[in-house]
Amino acid sequence: MIEKFLSADARNLRPSAIRALAKYINDPKVISFAGGSPNPETFPAERFAAIADRVLRERRNVSLQYGPTRGLPRLCEFVAARSRVKSEEVILTTGSQQALDLISHCLLDAGDIVAVELPTYIGGTSAFYARSATLAGVAQDDDGIVPESLDDVARKKRIKLLYTIPNFQNPSGRLMSQRRRDRVLEIANRHDFLIVEDDPYGDLVYVEGADTTPIKSRDRDGRVLYLGTFSKILAPGVRCGWIVGPKSLIDRVEIAKQAADLCSGMLDQSIIDEYCHAGELPGQIENVRAFYRGKRALMLSALQEHFGGRAHWTAASGGLFTFMTLSDSIDTASRIETAVANGVTYVPGSPFFVDGSGQNTMRLTFAKESDERLREGVQRLAHVFA
Ligand SMILES: Cc1ncc(COP(=O)(O)O)c(C=O)c1O
């Protein structure tokens, strides 16, 4: 009945291939490398509980009330100071996922071309498909976007924006080199398209010398829209992300956000605001890094032990993921049920590639499992792909 009433955009909505794996992710018998979530052990739950108690009792006029669409002013200022921009260049959003949706709403018409990395984050492509955009894949290597590939796409098609995740990309775990960031910005200038720089993982650095300086830091003319979030350094349940961009765009996004949700959750923002104002964020980031650093090392060494010489995987010098490429003849999606039967799961890589390639790849997170189960899981995985 409803089908014939759907809008053209609603007809273009695509379900997430990863959410379909959720039933395996929560089965305790199955060792999961499939999730994309941070580990709850890293969440500052006790501090949040104490702060929540206080802001609920003492600041109900803020924490339980509607608030400014742009976000709690002091938290906006905190974010602006961290990014070294003016407060008017910042808007807080309901996670960076809402930032992707609002930016798509404000910038994309049906048929507009968005260049995305091969592979890329599915929540990004979902937001672009939801506005009926056309996606064009750009090749990556271990240094990030291959400039010749981006230039080639831009010559053939009128790109409106490039979506990139330069720091420890989801799904590939790659870090784009600084030299490549210069090239990407130079190509954007030359072909006159915008860059959406999505950076949820930039603070999760595990290896000395990994340079995460954003593309945004060299943006002189407001071409780069930078997206940040507290999801991976604090907790994703307090839905709080942000956009840094030129004031004229932020003003526009604010109006779109009024229609979307009036304001993001004020209790979430109040808790984060108090936490950051008390100076607790740097110590928390150190704790989160320490937590994942060992897990990352453990997974990479288990991969070396069990897959050395017959697969390759990304260095994952930060973030939550490594990405494994097996020999061309292997289709990782077709083995997922065998893997689950063997008590391990992963995300097949193909859904992350807008050109349908990547059948022989998989995304592995080292965030979720205990050290022992990490080792055991890689062994089980090796058995499935023996
Ligand atoms: C690349 C990327 N962008 C955005 C998001 C959404 O994060 P948030 O919780 O801030 O909405 C994620 C979450 O996993 C992500 O990996």
Image: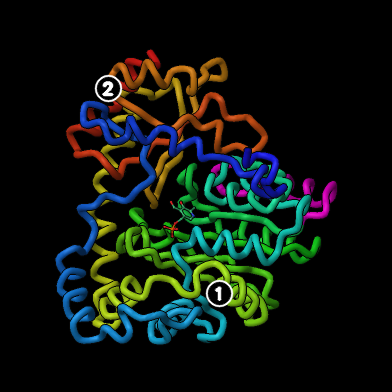
Give the percent coordinates (x, y) of residue 147: 70, 50
Give the percent coordinates (x, y) of residue 185: 68, 63
Residue at the top extreme of this rendering: 386
In screen coordinates, is 55 left or right of 358? left
Q: Is mark 2 within 8 Å of ligand 1?
A: no
Seen in the picture, residue 108 relative to 337 is either above or below; the reply is: below
Query: Residue 258, which numbered label?
Result: 1
User: Which residue lies at the image location 26% right of the left edge and 83% below the top edge?
Assistant: 60
Q: Nearer the viewer, residue 30 or 226?
A: 30
Q: Magenta stretch?
A: 141-159
Label 2 or label 1, whichever lies nearer to me, is 1
User: Which residue lies at the image location 63% right of the left edge and 82% below the top edge?
Assistant: 247
Q: Is 27 part of what is drawn in magenta? A: no
Give the percent coordinates (x, y) of residue 7: 69, 49
Give the percent coordinates (x, y) of residue 213: 50, 66
Residue identifier under label 2: 343
Q: Nearer the viewer, residue 207 or 92?
A: 92
Residue at the front extreme of this rendering: 1
Q: Quadrant of residue 224?
A: bottom right
For the C terminus, the quadrant is top left
For the residue marked with disc 1, what is the amino acid?
Answer: Gln
Q: Quadrant of residue 308?
A: top left
Label whose residue precedes the other's in the sequence (2 or 1): 1
Seen in the picture, residue 255 relative to 207 is either above or below; the reply is: below
User: Which residue lies at the image location 40% right of the left edge and 43% below the top edge?
Assistant: 321
Query: What is the secondary structure assignment of the residue under circle 2?
Result: loop
